Image (tube, rainbow, N blue to C red):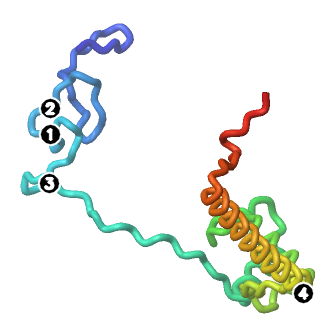
Amino acid sequence: MMIDKGIQDVERPAAAGTEGGRRPTGVPAAAGSKFLPGGDPIGPDGIVPQPNPQVVESPVRRRFTKAYKRDILEQVAACTKDGEVGHILRREGLYSSIVSTWRQKDKQGRLDAKAAIKRDVKPAVQDAGIPQLQRENARLKARLQQAELILEIQKKASEILGISLKTLDNERID
C-alpha cells in the first residue's frame, strides 16, 4: 500500500497501526490482533466475553429539596460575570428552564409550598336528568316487549288461518 508523503513514497504494511481501530474493508487483521474478524474483542483467556444481559433499571426522576433550590437560586443571583450561571448549571446537571421555573415560583411565594398533590378522580356527579332517562328507558323496553308479543300473536294467527304475511324481504317497491 502506497501513501503519498509529499515528495517521497513510503510503503506501509496492511493494517499497521490499526490495533483496536477501524481498518478499510477487505484489509485483513494484523497477526496477533485482539479482535475477531467481525470486530468482537477477544478476552485475555482467548474467549469472547458475553454482554451483560441484565436490564438496566429505568431512570428515576430527580427530586430537589427546598434548601437545594434556594441555594442554587442564591448562587445564580450572585453571578456577575458571563458564563458563571452556565458553569453552575453544568456543575449541578441542571437545565436553565428548571431554574427559571424555580425563580417564578419563588416570586409567587410557592417555592416553599408543598409539592403538587396528585388529585383523586372525582366520582361522577349524577345528572338530574339521569333518573328521568332511566324511567323512559324502562317504559320503552316494556313497549318493545308488548310490540314483540303482538307480532308473535299475528304470526300464529296467520299460520292458523293460512294467510301469508308480507315481510320486509318480500316487499319490493317498483
Q: CA distance from mark 4 to mark 2?
A: 68 Å
* Label 1 residue SS: loop
| Residue highlighted by disc 2 | 30
Report x, y in % for residue 103: 85, 76
Q: CA distance from mark 3 to mark 4?
A: 59 Å
Looking at the image, is 22 positioned above or below residue 129?
above
Which is more toward the observer, 141 or 29? 141
Q: Quadrant of residue 88?
A: bottom right
| Residue highlighted by disc 1 | 33
Looking at the image, is 27 positioned above or below residue 44?
above
Q: Amino acid at mark 2?
A: Ala
| Residue highlighted by disc 4 | 109
* Label 2 residue SS: loop
**Contact (Cβ within 8 Å) of mark 1 with mark 2:** yes
Report x, y in % for residue 156: 63, 63
Q: Is residue 87 visible?
A: no
Q: Quadrant of residue 55?
A: bottom left
- Graded by Cα atoms within 10 Å as few (under 14), some (14 to 19) or many (20 or more), the crowding at tag 4 reads few
Report x, y in % for residue 32: 9, 39
Looking at the image, is 161 positioned above or below residue 88?
above
Q: Amino acid at mark 1?
A: Ser
Question: At 70% across and 62% down in the image, what residue appears?
Answer: 154
